[in-house]
Amino acid sequence: SDIRFNLYGDPQIEGDAKLKREPTTGKYDLLVNDYYLQHIYASTIAAFRPQYVVTMGDMFSSQRTNKEEYYKRIDRFKWISHQVDANMAPISGSHAYLYLAGNHDIGYGGETRAYQVNRYTNNFGPLNHDWMVDFHNASQSSNGLHQFAIINAMHLDKTRDEQFRNATWQFLQQLATQRSQHPEIPLALFLHIPLNKPAGICTTHPKTNYTDGFVKYQDYLSPATSAYILHCLAPTLVFNGHDHDGCLSAHKIRRTASHPVALGDSGNTLQISDDLCRMNFTEIDTYQAEVEAFGEATLSAVAGSDLTSTADNLVAEVTVRSAMGAYGGVTGIFDISRDDSSAGSHMRALGRGFTLRTEHGYRYQYREVRLGDHLIIRILLVANILGAIAVPAALLF
């Protein structure tokens, strides 16, 4: 491949709360899990040599840790993700590390506080970020042939502190403007929470809980936000985490020149297809029912097993299965290559992955690599773990 991403879903490393609950066994459980996850990152980075190492959010198990515990977990995570060695010395490599903000990193929209955002951005980078890749030399550049974007999914829907939602939607609207000016450049999106889809396609069902009108819990993004992303950003692929079981699906988009929607009993209509991409989040909230109706009329989702089809107006969505041992220690491998063949647009499911060729001249492939059952890994590694209590392990006690 020309570009490769290693994707790691929701490691959710634990810490002080577990030690309080399980003062004796908790130490060893944390130690084993750290070594287990470190083995996943280190071995797959060495084996697949990606250009990008992406953790799909929820690096930690709780967004409410105090400052001392937070930075202790930062050091542990750097070792787990193969950024530093056992002596905390940086490990050199040609790959870039990227991160998505999850609910266990900064909280859902109804609970996020400024200190959570500040410490996240200080250690993991911006919440929203896009870049171009030039496939002639496979490096980041100011302009290129393929666009990528990381979006802060935690503040797309109703958020208590409006400054966070403002910043996210300003980025989204800038991205929509770029997409309208350069629709020929394909886009891959990365965001922690999956797009909305009907029950039965993934193991998770659509569910959102609110407190005082703000998001308290969310399995999927709202139908209105999902419609905006699919229509206005027109991505080729969307990657996310959050649902530990993982999922492969696709969204079929029916393009329409006009879709008037009645505004209540006023007799007025809204041309959603023309106006949607110019809306801000306040307007989308105001016309939420109308935007949702437009989405229902123009969007449909299919499960991974039904993905063998032409890829015209099709957006592939991958929810990366968790890297945690209980879910098999999965790493998602995402490859992009130039493909100038005349095979046409086509998508084909391959187990828990797919291949996709598009009219843009690219070939995409996604597959899962599993390192085995958690219990088996514990048995195989227990002797080495107990005899190799290194600096990162000492941080646990």
Image (tube, grey):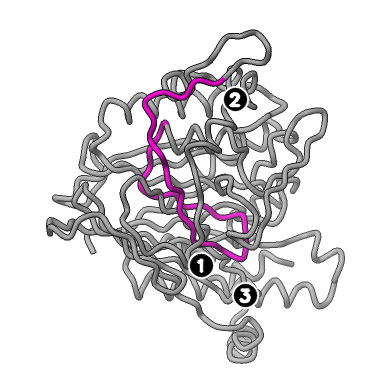
Q: Secondary structure at mark 3?
A: helix
> Which residue in the structure is indicated by mark 3?
325
Give the image location of residue 287, x and y in percent.
61, 20
The C terminus lies in quadrant:
bottom right
Give the image location of residue 334, x and y in percent.
36, 62
Q: Is residue 167 left or right of residue 161?
A: left
Residue 235 forms part of the magenta stretch: yes
The N terminus lies in quadrant:
bottom left
> Which residue in the structure is indicated by mark 2?
290
Q: Amino acid at mark 2?
A: Glu
* Image height of 259 relative to 118, above or below: above
State the residue at coordinates (61%, 66%).
245
Sequence-wise first label, 1 or 2 = 1
The quarter of the displayed image where residue 11 is located: bottom right
Q: Is residue 392 left or right of residue 185?
A: right
State the residue at coordinates (41%, 23%).
258
Q: Is residue 248 left or right of residue 1?
A: right
Q: How many angstroms separate mark 3 from mark 2 (CA)?
A: 43 Å
Q: Secondary structure at mark 2?
A: helix
Q: Is residue 275 left or right of residue 193?
A: left
Sequence-wise first label, 3 or 2 = 2
Q: How many angstroms separate mark 1 from mark 2 (CA)?
A: 57 Å
- Point out the stretch of residues depicted in magenta: 232-261
Most foreground residue, 7 or 140? 7
> Which residue in the structure is indicated by mark 1?
87
Instruction: Look at the image and tell me whether residue 93 can be seen.
Output: no
| Label 3 crowd bin: few (<14), some (14–19), many (20+), radius 10 Å | many
